[in-house]
Image (cartoon, rainbow, N blue to C red):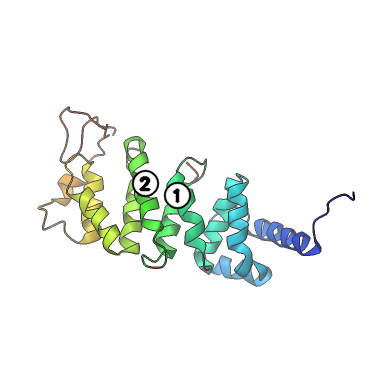
Amino acid sequence: MGEFTSSPADDADGIAAHRVKELVGTGYISAERAQAIVAAAPEARDRIVEWLRSAAASGDWRTVEKLANLAAHTRPEGLAAVLAPIVADGTAPTNYEDLVEILGEVADHERDPEAVPAIVRLMTARMPTDGQAYALSLKALQALGTIGGAEAEQALRAIAEDDDHPSQVRWEAAVELGIEDDLGFDEDEMTGPPVRWHEGDTGEAGPGGHAEADGDRSDPT
């Protein structure tokens, strides 16, 4: 039996994917830079979703991050469907703040029904261990506000009205819905010094949070 070899089409696709990875390089991808990359490698416009899916399947998370940041500008069809399960899983060594932000930008609540549950699942799992500024949680809330729709609005309202959530998080959820005044929230009080939240903590806390005071797309978490 002869040795298996990849087809010329597969070889060409692999070469194109490698070229795009080299063009993306490191650092922030502006709209202008994304346009230049696609001009130099037009295959990226049609193939980037499949390259993303392949990189995620193989655990190549640096490539996932690079391609996702490029795709955020090119908006290929099917991008949200690839990002949502990655976000929902929440366990990969990747920059979830970026991925959540991108998912919020590209998802449509009717076309991409998996996006909102994915973001809510990630936020629920990670909020107790989020950093002192709740950066990932706030990105998730902003993404829900951008996607919109009844399911996102329901999730935002539930967080805004829940006294057990940190005050900074409740404030952002309310702002996304425009109900901060209706809930009687005071911005200075709700967004004061970060308060660490511990699930089930019954100690004294600032407004809406359990206490233990801790005093552009970021690096991977």
Please provide percent x and percent y for residue 26: 60, 52
Q: Quadrant of residue 122?
A: top left
Please provide percent x and percent y for residue 46: 61, 69
Residue at 25 percent of width and 59 percent of height: 153
The residue sitting at the right extreme is 2
Q: Is residue 20 left or right of residue 92?
A: right
Q: Is residue 94 left or right of residue 111?
A: right
Given the image, on which type of amino acid does mark 2 rest? Arg
Q: Which residue is mark 1?
A: 87
Residue at 45 percent of width and 54 percent of height: 84
Please provide percent x and percent y for residue 72: 50, 63
Given the image, on which type of amino acid does mark 1 rest? Val
Asked if the residue under mark 2 is in contact with the one under mark 1, i.e. CB atoms within 8 Å, the reply is yes
User: Is 142 drawn above or below residue 57 in the view shown?
Assistant: below
Decide which of tag 1 and tag 2 comes sooner along the chain. Answer: 1
User: Is 15 drawn above or below residue 204 in the view shown?
Assistant: below
Residue at 52 percent of width and 40 percent of height: 93
Please provide percent x and percent y for residue 45: 60, 69
As helix, strand or loop, the secondary structure at mark 2 comes to helix
Residue at 55 percent of width and 69 percent of height: 32
As helix, strand or loop, the secondary structure at mark 1 comes to helix
Res. 182 visible in picture:
yes
- In front here: 74 or 123? 123
Q: Name the mark on residue 121.
A: 2
User: Tag 1: Cα neighbours inside 10 Å, few (<14), some, or many (≥20)?
Assistant: many
Q: Is residue 58 left or right of residue 201?
A: right
